[in-house]
Amino acid sequence: MNMRRLRCLAILLACWIIVLFPENVSAYPTAAEHNNLLHKILFEQGYSIYQSDEIKKSITAIDKASQLSIDQFGGKNEEDFDYLKSTETAGGVIRGLPWKFSDIDYSKSLPGKEKAISANTHHRYTHQGWGRTFDNSEVDKFLKKRRKVLTATVNSVFDFGAFANFTGGGEKCDSMCALVYYAHILGDYDGADNVNKITNFMIPLAGSSEGWDIISKLKENMAILFDDIKDDSKYTQYYNDMMNELNKIDDEASAIVRSGGPNSDNFSEYHQDAIETKDVLIKYVPELLKGEKFFAKVFYPNRTS
């Protein structure tokens, strides 16, 4: 059999796999796509992360810490962990990171963990909500170490204080981490091409009776993150408009969840709600973050109030 026929057979086989098993074909965004979305949510349009070496290193550290805390599995991304161990951000070296990569590598045997972790199964535990626990000491201890990668990095960049490294982050630090986390999850929702991608081990967009859904947690953490400026006349309208738009999407998505949950019939509508949530963050968060001193001193050092 010549090479041309072999290539044709390989293409046909790939097509049959897509047709027969569409749910197993990953549509999740790449790390670069996740980073791009995060930058859109954090920074105003046209912002350059390359304007200084310190700014570039700081946002790169957050990008890599996010990837390690949320998406890392199967021994991958050790070079990102090494980068965090050796780099300096706006606040200096990153203190409080786990001692070694194996402490956070999602390859260990955990209760309920699939035998083979893959791009389609690694969401178990890691994509269920920032700070969520599972009443299992082994799982919760492991996830705490994973979260520490992001909290230590964010604390280093913004200098929330040495105490934050020992407590897992103060309220501001933790809410900033939550924003980074839910930006990533919304990226996964945006990249989903069927309902299974957002119902298998993924935190719901809205409507959780326990409060563990994306929009509820976003509103909760935005109130903490922007506590210093939300009553400032310069930013009140931005903050209130953001919350009102999130509330509107929350009502729409919650109605789907409470009427039986997302399925193949209502997937398009539910998926659109997730996209609109992402767009609300892109629309309002950059301007609000510019008003927060902890953020402005790092990423807008020349900005005058």
Image: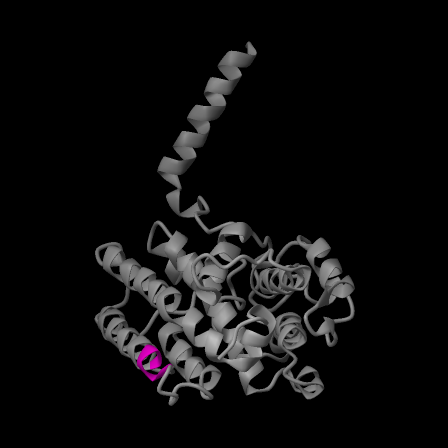
Question: How is colour applied across the structure in the image?
Answer: one colour
Quadrant of the image occupied by residue 300: bottom right
At x 57%, y 58%, the residue is 49
The residue lying toward the viewer, choosing from 240 and 296, is 296
Residue 158 in the image: above or below residue 19: below
Q: Residue 81 at x, y = what percent?
A: 71, 61
Residue 5 in the image: above or below residue 15: above
Left or right: 16, with 7 as reference point? left
The residue lying toward the viewer, choosing from 96 and 62, is 62
Left or right: 165, with 24 as reference point? right
Q: Residue 32 at x, y = what percent?
A: 54, 51
> Can residue 132 be seen in this snapshot?
no
Magenta region, main secondary structure: helix
Quadrant of the image occupied by residue 213: bottom left
For the N terminus, the image quarter is: top right
> Can residue 39 be seen in this snapshot?
yes
Left or right: 35, with 65 as reference point? left
Question: Residue most toward the top?
Answer: 2
Magenta highlight on residue 7 = no
Q: Residue 197 at x, y = what percent?
A: 40, 55
User: Disc count in the image?
Assistant: 0
Magenta stretch bounds: 235-239
At x 56%, y 64%, the residue is 70
Q: Residue 92 at x, y = what percent?
A: 74, 72
